Amino acid sequence: MAKRKLMMLGPPGAGKGTQAKLLSERLSIPHVSTGDMLREARRKGTPMGQEAARYMDGGQLVPDEVVIGIVRERLAEEDAQAGFILDGFPRTRPQAESLDAMGIVLEAVLNVRVSDDEVVRRLGGRLSCPACGRVYHEAFSPPTVSDTCDTCGHLGLIKREDDRPEAIRERLKGYWAQTNPLVEYYESKGVLVDVDGEREPVDVERQVVDAVQ
Ligand code: AMP
């Protein structure tokens, strides 16, 4: 039986979101992305969303207590009881320890490895649909019709504020200082699986699927 309490770890632009969506469909478990939830709170203009926006635009991490609160509520929902795929959480040691404190034991942590140069190349050209969240790349995977979302037809794809070059550098700095140490944290728990994120997307998917068997 496939593992069902999963997490995607890796730098920004590694393809965590794409792979998490595929796994979520394949295993019928919810895709829990803190980045998506924060962007949604921001779109709705909630006080938490407004506070988070200040950090997100600069490429900095939102404070632990804010993100931990969101995840705790989400994982308490009915549809997450049989499993979930965490994407973009935990990103710091206190966040990882908060999962332990909630009594959540991850069955596999998929560590998607991509070099810094590749991250810069990918995020620099990233476009997304503000309506449905689908992600494109100007050069590698453009929409069929220029500026129009293939999935929902929305006209006007946007560049995320935190995909500007200065914000990308800031996010990479944060990744190496705060998130990469989690590789060792989960390695010591025996649940870490390395995935080569620089291969073709179908190949990355195959590695991910194998890892959860
Ligand atoms: P993402 O879509 O996962 O790249 O997240 C976008 C932004 O949301 C990040 O650059 C952070 O500002 C914020 N964010 C998402 N997840 C977390 C987290 N687990 N801890 C702190 N900040 C987060």
Image (spheres, rainbow, N blue to C red):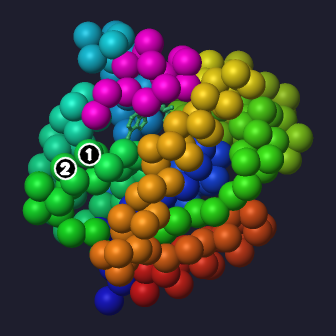
Quarter of image, res 181:
bottom left
Q: Residue at x 28, y 69 (%)?
A: 106
The residue tagged 1 is 94
Q: Residue at x 44, y 36 (%)?
A: 35
The residue tagged 2 is 98
Foreground mark, 2 or 1? 1
Residue 59, magenta (yes or no): yes
Q: Residue at x 49, y 26 (%)?
A: 60
Query: Residue placed farthest to the right in the image?
Result: 139
Q: Mark 1 belongs to which amino acid?
A: Pro
Q: Residue at x 75, y 63 (%)?
A: 198
* Circle 2/circle 1 CB separation < 8 Å: yes
Q: CA distance from mark 2 to mark 1?
A: 6 Å
Where, quadrant-wise, is the N terminus in this rendering?
bottom left
In the image shown, does 96 or 104 lie closer to the viewer? 96
Give the extent of the magenta segment: 52-64
Q: Secondary structure at mark 2?
A: helix
- Residue 136, x across and y down, in percent: 72, 40
Where, quadrant-wise, is the C terminus in this rendering?
bottom left
Residue 71 seen in the current view: yes
Q: Residues within 10 Å of mark 2 (few under 14, many from 20)?
A: some
- Residue 153, x across and y down, in percent: 66, 31
In the image shown, does 178 or 168 lie closer to the viewer? 178
Q: Mark 2 belongs to which amino acid?
A: Ser
Q: Secondary structure at mark 1?
A: helix
The disc placed on residue 211 is: none
67 left or right of 143? Answer: left
33 left or right of 117? Answer: left
